[in-house]
Each structure stands twice: as structure tokens, then as C-alpha cells.
Image (cartoon, coloured by chain):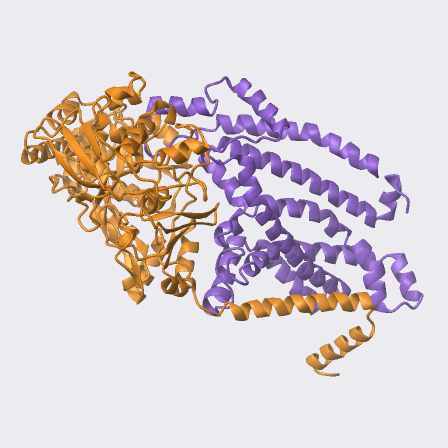
Chain colours: A purple, B orange
Amino acid sequence: MLRFIFTRLLQAIPVLLVVITVTFFLVRFAPGGPFDGERKVDPSVLKALEAQYNLDQPLITQYFSYLGDLIQGDLGPSFKYPGRSVNELIGAGFPITAELGIYAILVALAIGGCAGVLSALKPNSTRDYVSMSAAMIGICMPAFLLGPLLILIFGIWLEWLPVSGWGDLPGDKVLPSLTLGAVYAAYVARLSRGGMLEVLSQDYIRTARAKGLPEHVVILKHGLRAGMLPVVAYLGPAFAGILSGSFVIESVFQIHGLGRFYVLAAFNRDYTLIMGCTVFLAALIILFNLFSDVLAAYLNPRLRSQLGGKS
Amino acid sequence: MHPPHLRAIELLRTLMRQTSPKQTLHRLLISTLALTSLTLMACSNGETRVESGNRDGIFHVENSAEPQSIDPHVSTGVPENNIILALFEGLVSKDPADLTPVPGIAERWEISEDGKTYLFYIRENARWSDGEPITAHDYVWSWSRSLNPQMANEYAYMLFPLKNAEPYATGKMDNFDEVGVHAISDRILKVELENPTDYFLQLLDHHSTYAVPKHTILKYGSKTDRFSNWTRPGNMVSSGPFRLKEWDIYKVLKVEKNPYYWDKDTVSLNEIHFYPIENFSTAERMFRVGQVHKTFEIPLNKVDVYRKENPETLRNEPYIGTYYYQFNVTKPPFDDVRVRRALSLAIDREAINHSVMFGVVEPAYTLTPPGASGYEPPKLISFDPEEARRLLAEAGYPNGEGFPEVELLYNTNESHRKIAVAVQQMWNENLNLNIQLLNQEWKVYLASRNNLDYDIARAGWIGDIVNPINFLDLGLSSNGNNRSGYNNPAYDELILKTIPESATKEERLANFAKAEEIILNEMPFVPIYTYKTKYLLDPSVKGLTPNFMDYYSYKHVTLGN
């Protein structure tokens, strides 16, 4: 297992290098620069600005000096926010986005998992149709619609929950977590239903039932473990997707997370911030995929023995 | 068969009986979570932020974007300016009602007969927010910082009326002693100008001319360090009615009353909290539930609702800005003035205001917004489809025939798109032209305009000072903001030579009108509308006087019903 993790981490290095290189040159070749604005900057001022950010050096020199700084963990100064380093901005935004992501995943697992398992227990029943239709609506409903809808109901009409913020007012974390979790809950529901259906028709489940085990033990102990495998495999990419795609939620609910930095950085051509967020998220995505593979292996005895673990 | 709810209870009972201790624990956890959220729901029914703000003297302001920098010599945008106005004060300030210069850090000033030398007398009780005195030497040091080429201050040109300021700022001269600013004593600042400049006092209320604390800046970095930490809470020292208290990036920036401010007795607010919210709909919802006193802008689709239901909260006042279209005059067909005029005459500006902009703007028939320093620009254009068709035919395109394929460029934005669609339709109906629309992301759009890589483009200009020159400058061939390729030596001479040399105010106003006439006849820029502010303000906020520059004098603001 250790060797598997180590190999995967080694494989990550070239992947990251490709991500860095492609992003670096793509953002540089995009039209418009960080200092373009409605008001044209005086050429002498522009020259001074470019010198301060080393933009007056040849592109290839800038690339290697960026790589050099990156190895030392320095993501550079932000273009848009003079006086703030990219490390500082990511350090400020990431914990918020991660917290939101964890809550959203919990919401997704709680709602989606229950709905999926309940559907699978009685396939093609009304219960199944209702929860799967709800899941379909959840998948199709974009967060920028669901968010304002929930705000309208719980924030403005019922006045139960705050309409925006994160950690400012009591209960302001509920609606963003629900909104972000809802989309993923829908996927989890469909995946866990599929997984459970397949598992429940297996011989060992029949054996378990034939042994006279109570139904809930069959489902929760024997069925769930294998039935949730597709969900576990999905968790890594889902969490990565949540982290890099929380922009809409963060913008609708006014949350000061990483997603807003990232998208605005692209609009602002904040070269270093775009690079910093991309590299950071790419590394996270690789880690999460690895983590979900390890978890899947742990849950799946066949895979575990293949990877040299002892079961 | 039992009814469904009884069956559910039965199922629950069975489940409870058949659970292991571990599962019971899980259930307990879930119930606790549910209970907590219910409790939270119950707590949130209390006082709104606006109500508590009114009680504690805290003004909650939605400020649209995270400030890039609150260093007055680095900052460039409106959200930053809104914060800097609370933190700093100029040598000269503005009357919030009519924007005329009033004493700020300087208690009075004297202007020489020739209008080229100013003596400013700094208040004896002018203090930085750490109690250190503000002196004339601070201004000399600050202006040498603002103008220093190393500082890369985008607004350094605000000080260009000073003698030798431009050569110093552009690196053509190294010795700052030759620039027209000197401290005669701790309290007297002598300023010499290149030419008499009637709007010079106004410039002294622009953040690029503010004094900054030398002792703090040098403590946290070098004089011209843009990346310095001196603007962080705990480090920052300022000169205005408020001082920095807290800055939580992307969340809130808080300022508190400055106990050393010379006019602290006028200041009624204890704190101002600025929230960076890019999404106007989110901001509007926050306003609706009492989380902010003031929004930055109201979404257009909400205007009618507020007008009907809460008209007292809607602020919609004239603002010194023009929304216009510009032609790339360097290539056909827009190198022909008749085509440019025809397209301008075929636009029904009233209709745009009413059907697209919900009546929140003012149709514009001049480049300069009317009323800037007593100047009423000549109104030479109107909606005249008949004349437009005649001009187009004269230019060789009768009934639009043979007109080349051209595109109207705008940056991605819903209201720009709606206006472009309306104008496209007007040109089609009135001139039988088929103009294509092209939207580009902001920076791409800017690059296209800078490189003259467009046919027609939307543009907007907001005045830095209340003076027509700020708008008429756009037509200068040497102005980087012209971006239309328009080049008229007679116009350049009028702006660069004739107007500055005007002997009297009347003569100057007449020359402004002459310049405006040239622009309106040659039509490189097609005025569409004059901006108006459009934001929401809680009725408990008093003393935020509306004015032409949307300038906020926070020290006059009070809260309460």
C-alpha cells in the first residue's frame, strides 16, 4: 500500500509541472494585462509597474524564476492587491472554502446516501421514483438558482436564517452548506442507489439473508460497505470540485473563500494569484483522488490484496 | 393495513429496538445537530445589523469590491476611494452639498494675483491618528512620494499642475527641490504652479495628493514600497475622521473614530464597516433584511419594485459620468464624419433610458455632463432619423445599401448588452443597417480598444474633478484614453493652449463650449446617457448629502430614526 501511495505521489510531479507550465503560458498569452483599466496607465508608470513585478524580463526567465520561487514555497506577490502575497491570500481563503466543502460533503452524504439506500431497497416503488426524481432535479438545478431560492424562503420570507456571510451571524453557515451540498447529494443518491442495487443482487447477500440475519444487519453491514464504493470513488473528485467550484456559492452568499479569489484573479489577470490558486488546487485534487483510491482499496478486499496490503 | 403515519412510527420503533449502541450514538449525534440548527434559527430572529448599528453608531456600508490598496498613492478605484475618504483628509476638503473647496487639514490659504502661487496654512491641531502633528514638511515628503516614478502612482498626474512636477514624475528631472512645493515653516506650505489652474484646489481633495505618515511608512518599508505593510491594522496611521481598526480580507474592513482628528466633535459615527460584495443581488438581499445601511448599486431589475414600494430608500441622483459609444475613426466607414453623425442621430436616447435603463439615467446629448462648474454644454444633437438617412445617403450608403459589415463591441455585462441590442435595432429600423454585436471579457475588450481593434465600442468616463476639461480631454490626440484614433490639431490646440490661457472664467466657459461643439460635430464619441447614482440607503442614515461626484463626507453622517 505504501509503495502504491509513493508511486502515485511521484507520478504527481510531472502532472503538476505540466499544469504549471500550461497555465503560466496560457495566462500570459491571454489578451489584456494586469494593469489595463478603463483609464489608460501612463507609459512611464506602466514601465515602473512592470519592473516591480519583473514583467520586463523575458518570459522564459520569468517562468524559471517562478519555478524557483515555487520550489521554495513562495507564490509571489499579488498583482491586484499590492502588499498582499499569494500565500497570504490562499491562507486566508482556503480554510473557509474547506470548511464549506466539508459541510457540503456531509450534507451530500447524509441526504444523498439515505435517499439512495432507501430507493435501492424498494426499486421501482413510489419511494424510489420520488427520491430519484428529486435527485434528478437536484443535479439539474444550478446553485445560482437554488441559492437565491433558499435565501428567499428561509432568509427573507421565514426570516429563520441570515441571507449572507460566514461565521458572522448565528446560522449563516446553514444555507450555503445546504445549497452546495444539494447538487452533490443528488449525485450521491444516484450512485448509492446504483451501487446498492448491484450489491443486493449478489450471492453473498442472499447467503446472509439465508443465514437468517436481520434485514438491517444485511443492509448496513454487508450491503452498505460494498454498495457505497461508487460513492467513495466519487468523493475525491467531488471534494476537489467543491473546492475549485465554490465560486458561485461564495458569491451568492458573500463568503470570503478561495473560490472568489480564484475567479476574480482570472478576470483581473492577476498572474501570480491565478498561478498560485491553480497549483494549489491541482495539488489538492491529486491528493484527494489518491485519498479516495486508498479508501476504495480499503473497502474493497480484492483491490486491497492486489496492492499488497494484508486483509 | 395501518395508515402511513402509524406504519412509520411502527418502523421507527422496530429500528430503535434493533439498533446497536453505536447506531444509537449516531442517531444521538444527528438529533443534536438538528436541534442546534433549530436553536440557531430561533436566535437569528433578533435585532438586525442596521438596528444594532443605529444603536451603537456603526454605519454598515456595502462597498462592491475588496479594496486593492488603501495607500492613497497606490489606490485607483471607487471602492478604495470610499474607504480612503473615511481615513484621510485633504489639504482642502469639499462642501458635500455643492462641492466647493472648504478648509481641510489647511485652515486657510492665500492665492497670489497671477494665480500661480498658493500659501497653505496648516491647522495647529492637525494630528495623525497616533497623535503626531501633521506639518508642511509631511506634504513635501508625501508629494515627492506621490510623484516619484518608482512609486508608479497611476494618479500622479493629479499633481502635474505643480511647477516641474511632470518632468520629475516622468523621470526627466531628478531633483525634487525644483518641483513647486516647499515648506516655509512647520505650518506654512508654499505651492507654485506651472500655469494658473482654476481647479487646483479641487485636486487637493484627491487621494493622490493626500499627506501620508512618513514616520509610519519608513517604519514598515521604504518610501516608495508599494508592497509595504504600513496599511495593515495596527500599523496604519491616517489623518481623517476615522482610523483603520480591522481588515479581514474579502469579508469586512472596519474603521473607528479617530480621537486625534482636529474636527472630532463633528464626527457622530463610532465606526464604519465596509463589506466587499461584487454581487449586487446579494447586496440588495442584505439590504432587504437589514444587514447593511447602504448598497453600492441596485440591480436594474429591482428599481421598479423599490420605486413602488420603498421609494424613500432609493437614491437616484445626477453623477458626473458619461456613457458613450466611440468609433474607430481610422478606418472606413467611420473615417467619414457623415456616417458617424448619421449613426448618432439615429439613436433614440429617451427610449434607451425608459425601456432599457428603467429611467435611472439621463439621456446625454453632450460629452460633458451638464452642470460641471457652472458649464452648460451646447446641445447640438437630437434624435432625427430623417437627417440621419440623408447623411448616410450623402456618404454613399442610401438606405444602408453597400454598408460594410461592422461590429459593435461591448464588455460582457447585462445592461451593456441590452443597450447594444436596442441601439442595433434602432440602426436597423432607422437606417436599414445590420450591425453585429460582439461582447468580450473586460480585459480582452480593453485590449481591443487600446489597439484600435474594433469598429464601434461602448465606453464610459467618470470625472475625477468637477470640470469640463476632465471630459473634453478625451478628444486629445495625445490622450491614452481617447482610443478612437481621433486626431484634430485644432482641437488639441484649443485644449492645450487656448483654454489654459483664457483670461476670465467667461472666456474659459466659452472655449469649453467651442471644444464641445467640435466634438459634437465631428462625433468621434456618441454620448448615450449621463450617469446617475443608483443605490439603496436606509432612511435612518442622515447627512449623506447627495452630490455630483457621489462624494461622501462621513463626518457629517448620523444614524437614528
Question: In what quadrant of the picture does the N terminus of chain B appear?
Answer: bottom right
Near-viewer residue (B326 or A92): A92
Taking B455 as reference, is B16 left or right?
right
Rendered residue at 62%/67% (across/down) = B36
Residue B405 at least partly seen: no
Q: Quadrant of residue A196?
A: bottom right
- Seen in the picture, residue B365 relative to B221 is either above or below; the reply is below
Residue lying farthest right?
Answer: A211
Q: Position of residue B27 (x, y in %)?
A: 73, 68
- Seen in the picture, residue A126 relative to B412 is either above or below; the reply is below
Near-viewer residue (B336 or A301): A301
Question: In what quadrant of the picture does the C terminus of chain B appear?
Answer: bottom left
Q: Position of residue B18 (x, y in %)?
A: 83, 72
Taking B44 as reference, is B297 left or right?
left
Near-viewer residue (B440 or A237): A237
Q: Position of residue A23 (x, y in %)?
A: 56, 30
Rendered residue at 28%/35% (across/down) = B135
